[in-house]
């Protein structure tokens, strides 16, 4: 699927790509609604409905990914709530093998995430993946999420890469479409970001269920 002789740089998403999205889905759809209902003294069903509307109103923006935004909006310490269930943070199968193999081929490996700095720090501490990357780029430091084309221009200024010789792996269709519009040469979609959820469709992109499919040989 991948001719590694044609690749110099790997740009890798975190949540749903390297890490199991089950943690995030459980956190936002189960844990936060319970804590919100407790704080508001309202039924869980009402909390879920209210939060669903709030989530959708900022989907695809930096606010959606921002720990501080949700702490202010909901009156909850989101970073603390994440720590309450951090035992659910898990690395996807074959990810470490893939990163080690890419390192052996002397590829530049860059983590590129929309996750807020506080969430990123928690997940790097829990997974111990930080040492596998040459650089870690947080969209909040660039002021735009990956869904925006301008994000890639800003990324290019601080982390120069040859678009034609770059592989970008993500699970999000809007993000992959943004990267395609920017002209990144190799794009790959992870079809099962949540190991306990259904598989997604490739939607016109090269796709894998897990990283064993593209382990460099």
Image (tube, helix red, strand yellow):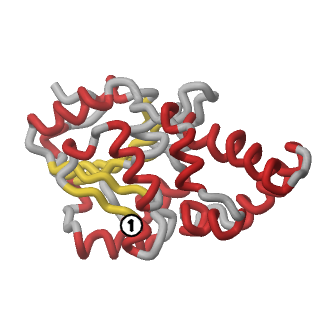
Quadrant showing the N terminus: top left
Total marks in image = 1
Q: 61 and 186: which one is in front?
A: 61
- 54 left or right of 100? right
Residue at point 43%, 40% (across, down): 17
**Residue that label 1 marks:** 182
Q: Could you tell me residue 84's position as x and y percent?
A: 56, 41
What secondary structure is found at the residue carrying circle 1? Answer: helix
Residue at point 47%, 35% (across, down): 89
Q: Could you tell me residue 39's position as x and y percent?
A: 79, 54
Q: Could you tell me residue 46's position as x and y percent?
A: 90, 50
Q: Could you tell me residue 22's position as x and y percent?
A: 57, 34
* Whether residue 191 can be seen here: no
Location of residue 80 with respect to 25 vertically, above or below = below
Q: 169 and 33: which one is in front?
A: 33
* Whether residue 205 can be seen here: yes
Q: Quadrant of residue 154?
A: bottom left
Q: Quadrant of residue 143?
A: bottom left
Residue at point 60%, 58% (across, down): 77
Location of residue 127 with respect to 37 vertically, above or below = above
- 147 left or right of 91? right
Location of residue 38 with respect to 142 vertically, above or below = above
- 54 left or right of 49? left
Q: 27 and 178: which one is in front?
A: 27
Mark 1, other Cα within 10 Å: few <14 / some 14–19 / many ≥20 = some
Quadrant showing the C terminus: top left
Residue at point 17%, 45% (across, down): 6
Q: Quadrant of residue 69?
A: bottom right
């Amino acid at each position: 699927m991948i001719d590694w002789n044609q690749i110099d740089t790997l740009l890798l998403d975190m949540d749903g790509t390297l890490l199991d999205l089950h943690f995030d889905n459980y956190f936002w759809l189960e844990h936060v609604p319970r804590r919100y209902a407790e704080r508001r003294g309202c039924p869980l069903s009402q909390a879920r409905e209210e939060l669903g509307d709030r989530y959708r109103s900022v989907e695809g923006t930096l606010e959606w990914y921002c720990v501080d935004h949700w702490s202010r909006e909901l009156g909850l310490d989101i970073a603390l709530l994440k720590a309450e269930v951090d035992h659910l943070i898990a690395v996807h199968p074959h990810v470490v093998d893939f990163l080690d193999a890419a390192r052996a081929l002397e590829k530049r490996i860059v983590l590129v995430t929309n996750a807020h700095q506080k969430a990123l720090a928690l997940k790097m501490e829990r997974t111990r993946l930080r040492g596998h990357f040459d650089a870690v780029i947080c969209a909040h430091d660039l002021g735009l999420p990956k869904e925006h084309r301008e994000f890639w221009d800003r990324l290019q200024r601080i982390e120069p890469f040859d678009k034609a010789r770059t592989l970008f792996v993500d699970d999000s269709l809007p993000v992959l479409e943004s990267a395609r519009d920017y002209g990144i040469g190799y794009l790959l979609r992870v079809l099962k970001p949540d190991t306990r959820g259904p598989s997604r469709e490739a939607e016109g992109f090269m796709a894998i269920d897990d990283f064993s499919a593209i382990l460099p040989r």
